[in-house]
Image (cartoon, rainbow, N blue to C red):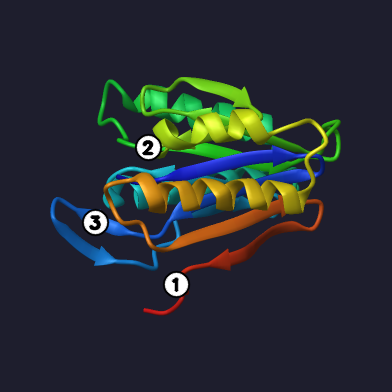
Amino acid sequence: MDTVFGVSYNGGVVLATDQVNARSILMYQQNLDKIAELSSHSAMGVSGPNCDLVNFSEYVSKNLALYELSNDGLRLSTHAQANFCRGELAKALRKGPFQVNVILGGYDDKTPTGGSLYVMDYMGSCVKAKYGAQGYASNFCLSIMDRDWDENLNEDAAVVLVEKCMKELQMRFLINQSNFIIKVIDKEGVRTLKFGADPTDN
């Protein structure tokens, strides 16, 4: 039932997820942060069971941190990070699959538009995209993104597009996803733009 959005714009990427931790008919919390920061300039929104969500997010972020420490501070590009994630998802298929779907975004100085976005599923497929949605949200929101996204999108317009998708879900979707968290990744790094419930309030 998780929802993940990703929209690239001219200068960065916007990632958003719902904040609900639920299973079956029970809701455990409404302030979960499902966007894991991988480096100073990259993050990934993850959907799936909470155990796999936390396990995979921490596994990837710690391995990327280890790589940086082992290579004199060399940070992998967003493309390399996406390929590492894809490789780990594919490798786990024949052992103990991670039941997670991922949207990974990051900012690179060498990328013409700055931001890049990669959409992955639990089977290990990976595609570079301009925008993406994971979960049931894709049924409602991909058409909105397809209509409203363009090459000259700026940060404000990208955030408005994501918020439009959230409103559509709250109006049309059977499941109530009241809280969302939005993060922006640009040349300044990863920052939290807004949230429905404070993730640090436990």
Of residues 179 and 38, the one drawn nearer to the viewer in this rendering: 179
Whether residue 68 is visible: yes
Question: Crowdedness of circle 3 by 10 Å Cα count: few (<14), some, many (20+)?
Answer: some
Question: Which residue is labeled 1 in the image?
Answer: 197
Alpha-carbon span between mark 2 and mark 3? 14 Å
**Residue pictured at 62% horizontal, 64% vertical:** 192
In the rendered structure, which disc, 1 or 3, sits on the residue that comes first in sequence? 3
The residue that mark 3 highlights is 22
Q: Quadrant of the N terminus?
A: top left
Q: Is residue 104 left or right of residue 176?
A: right
Q: Tell me the amino acid under the disc marked 3.
A: Ala
Query: Regarding mark 1 in the picture, which secondary structure is present there?
Result: loop
In the rendered image, is residue 42 in sight?
Answer: no
Q: Position of residue 167 (x, y in %)?
A: 48, 53
| Residue 141 picture location, percent across and down | 49, 36
Residue 60 sits above or below residue 92 on the image: below
Image-based side of 99 in relation to 17, left or right: left
